[in-house]
């Protein structure tokens, strides 16, 4: 697929076929994350990859009360948890970048997966405290997101249909509603009025 087609066609997938993701494709997905840019090349991301269905089911039960809405992950053949190591942080302009860097890396993985027809669903509904405790993660790690990965099932469950109606994917504003463009003109003038 062409890049823009890939980006435009990607959507959250919550219903998966049981087929495992081939090892070489899983490695490519992880490599896409590794190749992401990061502030001062600190690469703060740390990924936990689960392909054992029993472990995934147990994780689904250890996401806290807010995470109960993620029960569908128990049917995915793969679950990846994105963590950010705060000890690898770069702080610029009073902004911590380790979380941003990890999100960029994770999004590259989502797109690399979709390039192979493997769907995913970026999840933030979980108790970080409960999940960190269950996984025995180091104190310096933050859980940024998690996503189930797998080949999309043809038929959507009632749960998926309900959640899709809340996602408002079809109601995205146009680019001009979200971008302000400053074009160069012949006249030299400050881009904003003086304060």
Image (cartoon, grey):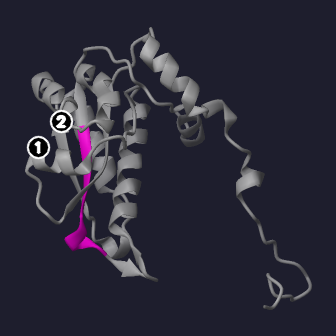
Residue 130, compared with residue 151, is above or below; it is below
Q: How would you classify the magenta stretch by its main secondary structure? A: strand
Left or right of 121 in this view: 28: left
Q: Which residues are magenta?
A: 80-89
Element at badge 2? Answer: loop
| The one of 19 and 142 positioned closer to us in this rendering | 142
For the view shown, which residue lies furthest in the left direction?
A: 136
Residue 73 image point, x, y percent: 28, 26
Q: Which residue is mark 1?
A: 134
In the image, residue 163 lies at what x, y percent? 49, 25
The answer to whether marks 1 and 2 mark residues whose Cβ atoms lie closer than 8 Å is: yes
Question: From what the image shows, is residue 149 above or below residue 130?
Answer: above
Look at the picture and state if 69 lies above or below 101.
above
The residue beneath circle 2 is: 62
Which residue of the protein is positioned furthest toward the right in this rendering? 187
Count neighbours of disc 1 (C-alpha within 10 A) and say few if under 14, some if 14 to 19, many if 20 or more.
Answer: few
């Amino acid at each position: 697929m062409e890049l823009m087609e890939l980006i435009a066609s990607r959507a959250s997938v919550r219903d998966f076929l049981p087929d495992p993701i081939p090892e070489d494709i899983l490695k490519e997905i992880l490599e896409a994350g590794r190749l992401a840019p990061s502030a001062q090349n600190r690469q703060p991301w740390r990924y936990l990859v689960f392909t054992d269905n029993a472990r995934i089911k147990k994780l689904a039960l250890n996401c806290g009360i807010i995470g109960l809405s993620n029960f569908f992950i128990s049917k995915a053949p793969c679950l990846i948890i994105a963590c950010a190591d705060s000890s690898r942080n770069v702080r610029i302009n009073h902004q911590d970048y380790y979380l941003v860097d990890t999100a960029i890396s994770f999004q590259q993985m989502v797109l690399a997966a979709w390039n192979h027809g493997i769907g995913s669903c970026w999840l933030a509904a979980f108790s970080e405290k409960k999940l960190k405790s269950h996984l025995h993660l180091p104190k310096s790690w933050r859980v940024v997101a998690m996503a189930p990965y797998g080949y999309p099932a043809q038929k959507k469950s009632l749960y998926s249909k309900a959640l899709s109606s809340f996602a408002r994917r079809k109601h995205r504003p146009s680019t001009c509603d979200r971008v302000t463009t400053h074009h160069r003109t012949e006249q030299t003038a400050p881009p904003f009025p003086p304060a």
